[in-house]
Amino acid sequence: MTLLRTRTVQVSSPQQLRLQRSWYWYDWASASYVTVTAAVLFSPYLTSIANKVACPTLPSDAACNNNLHILGIGVAPGSLVPYLLTLSTIISAVVLIFVGAIVDRSSHPLRYLAGFTYVGAVAAGGMVAIGGTDWQLGVGLAILANLCLGAALIVYSAIMIRITPPDDRDYVSSRGWAYGYLGGGTLLAATLVLLVTHGALGLDKAGAVRVAFLAAGVWWGLFAIIPLRGLRTLNGTRPVQPRDRIGGFRQLRTTFASLRDYPQTKRFLLAYLFYNDGMQTVIASASLYGSKQLKFSDSELVVTILLVQIVAFFGAMGFARLAARYGAHRMIYSSLFLWTLVVCLACLLPERQLALWLLLASGIGLILGGSQSLSRSLYSGLVPAGRESEFFSLYQAMERGTSWLGTLVFGLVFQWFRDYRYSIVALLIFFGVGAILLRGLRVREGIVAAGNTPPRVV
């Protein structure tokens, strides 16, 4: 214990601090799509289009008991977006592992970050073309944008390890998330103005939503220039050769096999699979639940997510301070009990009770900021040295709205009962299983086994 207290604290050098200041801005950039499109507007908008196709004689906001027919399978319109997220993640889970293995072998990781960013930004901005009954276009663009976002975040998260010593990672990861909450919140505030004043601008409600889709894509691509330029001097390990690309594809098998050598890393990933699926499904489905179950308007939902963004900024920074004293592991574990409470309260919330809904949103924001940022920094210590992108590809397959099991359960429960309250309460199992797995995690042992130096407080 004495050695633990007297170990030299590893702090960032001036050069690392400069790189970190550039690195933060990618969270600011990508948060536009995550917040405005994925978290708020896309689910209600695409569900309304699906309702219109399945029940053309009913208003788009009315309950629709008919099914869409996709490849001969009946799909409830209200389950379309959860199923879409599930499909998107299954595709990502395979593709992103290839991406991580290849990027680890690249001498120019920023080229990959730029490529994924601008393809994703174009797909996100291209959602401006979704209209009428064309839900298929929305499905295709969402899958492409989600895949590119996940791939870009693999590179981005792996870079954090290379520019940040262990003792600073909780702070740097939390600050990056805080930038994201501020960036997403800034564009969301502008989106709120657009939705409230769309009539004066000559737009109908659907047109205003499509303009917001375009703005999110442009924001993502525009602000990504800052980290791409600021990190341009960062090089990879060695140039990619043709045989390395082949090796990258073979890594799909060896990455999973190598987890046997890192049992604590494996345990964290399993815990993260469950509790992050629960978190991400709550976030991805919040606008759908608020719109279709609790009958809130688009403007009220934008205010809700804006409040979440503001509170999550303070939550991320507050949890970082607590982690410096108690350790990231303990703080994440504690947050799962708060998530369980939030889900229970959401299930009991009456319709159109905006004040209670906003109070609940504040609670979500507080724990969301801390649990997301500390999960990234904790995992960074469990990643084997030199295989950052490869292992973050596993992490990223379950990150930021790309959860698949939770959205599948959410969609299936609605398909069976046609009530989103049952879908919400079904998510409790994810937080419970995640907490059980996380409790048995031996963090210090896992960090040492991965060849890394444990931080002062684990």
Image (cartoon, grey):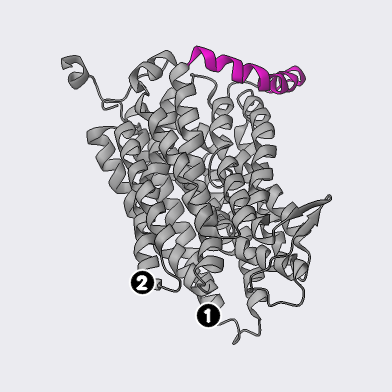
Q: Would you call the spot at circle 2 few (<14 residues within 10 Å), some (14-19), or many (20 or more)?
A: few
Residue type pointed to by label 1? Val
**Residues shaded magenta:** 240-262
The residue at which mark 1 appears reads as: 196
Viewed as shown, does residue 281 lie left or right of 431?
A: right
Q: Quadrant of the C terminus?
A: top left
Query: Counting residues from the N terminus, which is met first, the one under dot 1 or under dot 2?
Result: 1
- Measured from the top left, where is residue 400 in percent x and y? 53, 45
Viewed as shown, does residue 251 lie left or right of 305?
A: right
Q: Nearer the viewer, mark 1 or mark 2?
A: 2
- Measured from the top left, where is residue 449 in percent x and y? 42, 13
Q: Quadrant of residue 60?
A: bottom right
Q: Quadrant of the N terminus?
A: top left
Closer-to-camera residue (209/30): 209
Q: Is residue 159 magenta?
A: no
Q: Is residue 257 magenta?
A: yes
Closer-to-camera residue (317/430): 430
- In the figure, 138 relative to 331: above or below? below
Q: Quadrant of residue 244?
A: top right
- In the figure, 10 relative to 450: above or below? below
Residue type pointed to by label 2? Ala
Viewed as shown, does residue 376 lie left or right of 151?
A: left
Closer-to-camera residue (293/81): 293
Give the residue drawn at x 64%, y 48%: 85
Residue 355 disc label: 2
